[in-house]
């Protein structure tokens, strides 16, 4: 009988390919560009990912539009950030661009494959979710504005839809020709294909009305183009969680309609309208505020519908799956066959290796802070993310004595990295534990999940042999006594204060979280980012919105019944 660890490590046959385990890295570019992305991909493929799905093209009408992060790095590419603009194309430019992109994408596929992973190229079009100042048009089946930028899209005509299909087909053929093992179509998160299947966003009454018609037609043509050997998958939204939108039952029916054309189905949830405008729906790239595995229930419904129809296909589920234990539970319960993640691999490139080998407790957990979203890749859990090729691994010729002042995330990480390189490192902090301000912030229920980062910092400091001296003030005498070669000053930032004059005592967010109370008889005072008022002592208003400012209002430490006198 298989153990939990065996199940995660068990190979799986999908179409013409065999995956070495059940761990899949789902699409993300991180704005790394063609220069830095190969090292990023190589690090994760080498660490045991079974399949890597990469953003590899976007189909617009009868011409392809490509990921701007990649296009911007090609010699001779235009300076715009949207690939090929939507206007009469320059054939010479497009020919050069296609040739350059073909080489780049072939290199991406080879980078993943040479470490034993399967490489899939995903075709995605944002549809209505385009910035209004983009050179490329916002497109949709109906002219309902996008949720991210508020752009009103062009409603496609029947002829344009036919051209759109051929654009996707051409992209799929290019991906297969560039050495990828397969192609995935993106039909989730409110993007173009998702809008076609959504009864809320698709108000058409012609043959392209909401449902599976477009997907079936598109998949038929893609399969004709790429043949039977390359894998063909599709990311499907399980629910839009809005009135009149896509429901799990609708998605299950669509899954049954498209399953005959697929080798696997990727299931996700979340739109750009999530947690906006009073909507409680799941947001795209769900933050720490949302539940783990929000798509699992929908995946289970789809799994049941496919089984009842005799159309079983390997099912991949993704979305806030950050621990090995949860991944195993999903597989054990039969809700999915493959575990997809993106941010988990940003936080820990060894996520797959640790999960399949039973070392889940060693995983550096993604805390869902979304510092990696829509910006050049960065991660407070893994400062090396996106910089894999930047740091030499050799020991220093002459190790130094380094004193790091401040044991918050920056200081503790700097200390651990320096010790890992072979330096003698002393870490000072006037508090009695590692974590700094972060340790106080996780006292809030809203930020409790971030305590995983505090635990990781503690483990890193211990594991690398850092000499941590808690309760030590870094003054002139202390530093003179330690006689360091180098000092790293990492004392952190001060809490924000109110941006206007305040004739009242002021407590910071940190003060409240550690239980400090005012000592004066006045009945009102200012909390940075929040104002408590005498006229409404049980209410609060944002001075500046943000997780740190919001969180005190929901913790036990700031109940006005205990604070206001």
Image: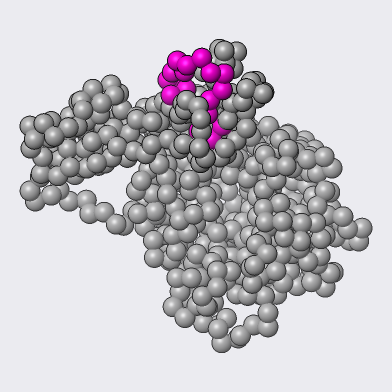
Q: Residue furthest front?
A: 503
x and y percentages locating residue 78 in the rendered image: 52, 78
Is 348 displayed left or right of 197 in the figure?
Answer: left
Identify the residue shown where x is 10% and y is 40%. 484
Where 258 sits versus 381, above or below? below
The quarter of the rendered structure image containing the C terminus is top right
Name the outermost residue toward the right: 205
Visible in this render: residue 329? no
Q: Would residue 547 appear left or right of 41 to someone viewing this image?
A: right
At x 7%, y 32%, the residue is 481
Q: Residue at x 79, y 50 (%)?
A: 198
Tell me the chief SS of the magenta region. Answer: loop
In depth, the one of 165 and 492 nearer the eye is: 492
Q: Residue 313 at what x, y percent from top left? A: 66, 44
Measured from the top left, where is residue 149 in percent x and y? 67, 56
- How many numbered marks, from 0 up? 0
The residue furthest bottom is 92
| Residue stretch in magenta | 511-530
Position of 420 relative to 164 (above/below) = above
**Above or below — where is 423 with respect to 143?**
above
Q: Is residue 401 left or right of residue 68?
A: left
Please tell me whether residue 534 is drawn above or below residue 159 in the rendered image.
Answer: above
Residue 38 visible? The answer is yes
Residue 512 lies in the magenta stretch = yes
What residue is rendered at 67% in x and 75% in y? 86
Q: On the image, which quarter does residue 553 sit in?
A: top right
Residue placed most toward the observer, 35 or 429: 429
Expressed as whole percent of the image width and height from the top left, the position of residue 97 reads 52, 78
Q: Is residue 12 magenta?
A: no
Q: Closer to the camera, 23 or 408?
A: 408
């Amino acid at each position: 009988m298989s153990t939990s660890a065996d199940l995660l490590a068990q190979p799986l046959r999908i179409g013409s390919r065999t995956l070495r385990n059940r761990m899949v890295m789902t699409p993300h570019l991180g704005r790394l560009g063609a220069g830095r992305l190969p090292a990023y991909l190589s690090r994760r493929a080498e660490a045991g990912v079974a399949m890597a799905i990469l953003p590899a093209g976007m189909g617009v009408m009868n011409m392809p539009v490509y990921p701007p992060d990649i296009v911007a790095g090609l010699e001779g590419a235009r300076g715009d950030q949207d690939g090929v603009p939507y206007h009469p194309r320059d054939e010479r430019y497009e020919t050069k661009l296609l040739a350059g992109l073909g080489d780049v994408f072939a290199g991406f596929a080879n980078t993943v494959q040479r470490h034993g992973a399967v490489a899939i190229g995903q075709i995605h079009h944002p549809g209505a979710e385009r910035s209004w100042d983009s050179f490329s048009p916002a497109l949709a089946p109906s002219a309902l504005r996008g949720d991210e930028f508020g752009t009103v899209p062009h409603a496609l005509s029947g002829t344009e839809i036919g051209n759109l299909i051929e654009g996707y087909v051409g992209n799929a053929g290019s991906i297969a020709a560039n050495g990828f093992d397969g192609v995935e179509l993106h039909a989730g998160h409110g993007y173009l294909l998702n809008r076609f299947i959504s009864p809320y966003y698709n108000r058409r009454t012609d043959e392209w009305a909401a449902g599976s018609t477009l997907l079936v037609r598109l998949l038929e043509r893609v399969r004709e183009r790429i043949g039977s050997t390359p894998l063909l998958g599709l990311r499907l939204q399980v629910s839009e969680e809005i009135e009149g939108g896509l429901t799990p039952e609708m998605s299950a029916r669509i899954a049954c309609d498209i399953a005959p054309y697929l080798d696997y189905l990727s299931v996700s949830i979340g739109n750009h309208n999530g947690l906006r405008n009073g909507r409680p729906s799941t947001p795209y790239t769900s933050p720490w505020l949302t539940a783990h595995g929000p798509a699992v229930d929908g995946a289970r419904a789809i799994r049941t519908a496919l089984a009842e129809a005799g159309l079983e296909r390997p099912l991949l589920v993704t979305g806030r799956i950050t621990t090995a234990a949860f991944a195993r539970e999903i597989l054990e319960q039969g809700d999915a066959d493959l575990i997809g993640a993106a941010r988990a691999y940003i936080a820990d490139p060894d996520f797959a290796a640790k999960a399949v080998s039973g070392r889940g407790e060693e995983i550096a957990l993604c805390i869902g802070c979304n510092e990696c979203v829509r910006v050049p890749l960065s991660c407070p859990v893994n400062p090396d993310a996106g910089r894999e090729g930047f740091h030499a691994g050799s020991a220093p010729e002459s190790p130094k004595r380094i004193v790091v002042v401040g044991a918050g995330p920056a200081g503790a990480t700097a200390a651990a990295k320096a010790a890992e390189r072979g330096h003698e490192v002393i870490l000072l902090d006037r508090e009695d534990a590692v974590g700094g301000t972060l340790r106080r912030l996780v006292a809030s229920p809203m930020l409790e999940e971030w305590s995983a980062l505090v635990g990781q910092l503690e483990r890193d400091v211990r594991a690398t042999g850092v000499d941590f001296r808690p309760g030590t003030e870094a003054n002139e005498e202390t530093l003179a006594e330690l006689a360091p070669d180098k000092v790293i000053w990492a004392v952190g930032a001060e809490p924000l204060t109110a941006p206007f004059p305040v004739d009242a005592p002021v407590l910071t967010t940190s003060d409240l979280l550690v239980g400090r109370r005012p000592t004066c008889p006045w009945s009102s005072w200012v909390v940075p980012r929040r104002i408590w008022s005498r006229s409404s002592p049980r209410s609060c208003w944002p001075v500046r919105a943000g997780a740190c400012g919001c969180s005190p209002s929901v913790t036990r430490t700031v109940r006005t019944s205990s604070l206001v006198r």
